[in-house]
Image: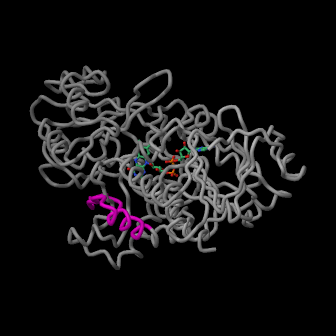
Amino acid sequence: MKRRTLLLSPLPFVLSSLVNAKPIEKTETAEIVIIGAGAAGLFAAVAAKENGAGRVVLIEKNPSPFFSSTSYSAGSVNASGTLAQLKHGIQDIDGKEEFTEEILRQGNYENDKALVANYVKNAAPALDWLTEKGVELTPSTNIAFRVKRMHGCDLATGARYVEVLFSEAIRLGVEIWFNTKAIELITEKGNEVLGVQYKRGRSYGNLLAQKGVILCTGGFAGDVNRVDRDIPKFAGLPTFASPSSRGEGLDMATRIGAATHLLDYMGAYAYGFPLDEETRRGLIFRGHVMNLYGSITLNKAGKRFINDDQNSTKVAQFLTSHHERTVYQLATEAQLSDFMKNDPIQVIGWDRTKFNQEKEEGGHFINRVNSLEECASEMGCSFDALKNTIDAYNRSVASGNDGEFGRKFMKGQFLSGPFYLFKCTPVVGITIGGLKVNRQMQVLNEYGEPISKLFAAGEVVGGLHGTSYIGGCSLAGALALGRMVGEQLAKS
Ligand SMILES: Cc1cc2nc3c(=O)[nH]c(=O)nc-3n(C[C@H](O)[C@H](O)[C@H](O)COP(=O)(O)OP(=O)(O)OC[C@H]3O[C@@H](n4cnc5c(N)ncnc54)[C@H](O)[C@@H]3O)c2cc1C
């Protein structure tokens, strides 16, 4: 279909002037318009169609849905009461209250409680839908939860969900406009969203939405300059987010008066490493999981400083608040091979061959050292300090009591080399603050009133995590709440 016929906008003057008077070549109307083809946008589109919506248009600035943070992600998703849990013999049908409390505790009770309630209610049905479409979900341990509420998927990547949702969206007749960037929300007198102005190539168009626009544009962690400017405590760190996560949806909404909250908090991982100094791209090493197999976390002085079996975000928060940019992990050969045997991914975005190569040859962040002397020399710390740390830790393992640090997962002493030394740095990658929404996922203005016909889901929304990122809730939140808002709008 040719979309580039030169037409003057048939919209009234007031409307075009509100969107910066671009030379509009085409104006058309859909029932529901969704911006962003990540987990939230794709599921919103699918759910809208499943619930009888007419024309649903999904706008995506990339040439495919596989450039989103969802696609880059590790695919871990948290929910309570899933079919997958039942299949694996985990009784969690009555666990929603406890799950809610666990999320609030992780988020330092700063979470948006209505959003958490929406999430807890909708997460299991969303994951069950994926199970029914053939995605194999396996419950796994996450220390935030008493029972296995984190789920990994068969391919250990969020691209698996994208693949399923994308093909379902096509099958159901969702129109997906790739290479199309939403640039402005079209409003009438500032209080009702009529649609969105977009740019494709060199031409501009207006897409009007009868029932509403759903913003699913993700966060802004892919834009390191913005992170440097807006969240100084993370300035200079590498990012693992998709470069597409640039906060454009957030900006479009705030330009028409939307309120935001918790924007100075982010999801960061303690154990990452830089890939490219210039672009500041980095990757996550799942060192927090390796610690469950016995490795330990050390500072530059060769000392332990934290309970290192807690989640990576908490360790990252400690490091960034102390302006620390380097942290080491030390593992024995047995601990590392245990981790590799039991965990499908070590570095998110690398396959096993690539990780093995790094393990054997180093080059990015792993060093094989034959002795503690060699280890101290690699770290640039005093051998005596390191030796004292290791001796004390070995005594803790023997007694089963970690004293000062209170670590529970202590597996194996550090007796003789070789050891593996991982030189890590915190990496940012997930926005946890964002737009304020109400129970219906309507975007709120500064006065707490809903902006008519503007909805949001996924990482563009703030408040689910409170002030501390909870791994597995971001992606599951995008899936669950994208689906919820798509269904709700179709039925409205
Ligand atoms: C490497 C990595 C690993 C992760 N692992 C996990 C994990 O295991 N578990 C977990 O819970 N979370 C994880 N996360 C976070 C999680 O993936 C995201 O928070 C979640 O997927 C966000 O989904 P979304 O649909 O809101 O946004 P996204 O997946 O970011 O999708 C947004 C889409 O909107 C498009 N877009 C943006 N602006 C525009 C515009 N102006 N016009 C048109 N299109 C636009 C983007 O191109 C993108 O395709 C991880 C993130 C990364 C980067």
41 up-or-down from 492: above or below: above
Residue 109 or 227: which is nearer the viewer? 227
Position of residue 115 measured from the top left corner of the image (x, y, whole percent)? 55, 66
Which residue occupies the extreme left position in the image? 416
Residue 396 is left or right of residue 112, and the answer is left
Which image quarter holds the N terminus?
top right
Q: Quadrant of the C terminus?
A: bottom right
Answer above or below: position of 425 versus 116: above
Q: In the picture provided, is 285 more to the left or to the right than 213?
A: left
Residue at 26 percent across and 21 percent down: it is 378
The stretch of residues the image draws in magenta is 123-145
Q: Position of residue 433 (x, y in %)?
A: 58, 52
Q: Nearer the viewer, residue 398 or 311?
A: 311
472 above or below 448?
Answer: above
Q: Position of residue 184 (x, y in %)?
A: 73, 46
Q: Is 126 part of what is drawn in magenta?
A: yes
Total marks placed: 0
The image's colour scheme reads one colour
Residue pictured at 70% horizontal, 51% vertical? 207
Between 104 and 202, the residue placed more toward the observer is: 202
Q: Residue at x 35, y 29 (%)?
A: 300
Farthest right residue in view: 13
Residue 297 % position (x, y) = 29, 39
Can you tell which quarter of the image residue 182 is in? top right
Q: Residue furthest front?
A: 1
Specify whether residue 382 is painted magenta. Answer: no
Give left or right: position of 404 versus 192: left
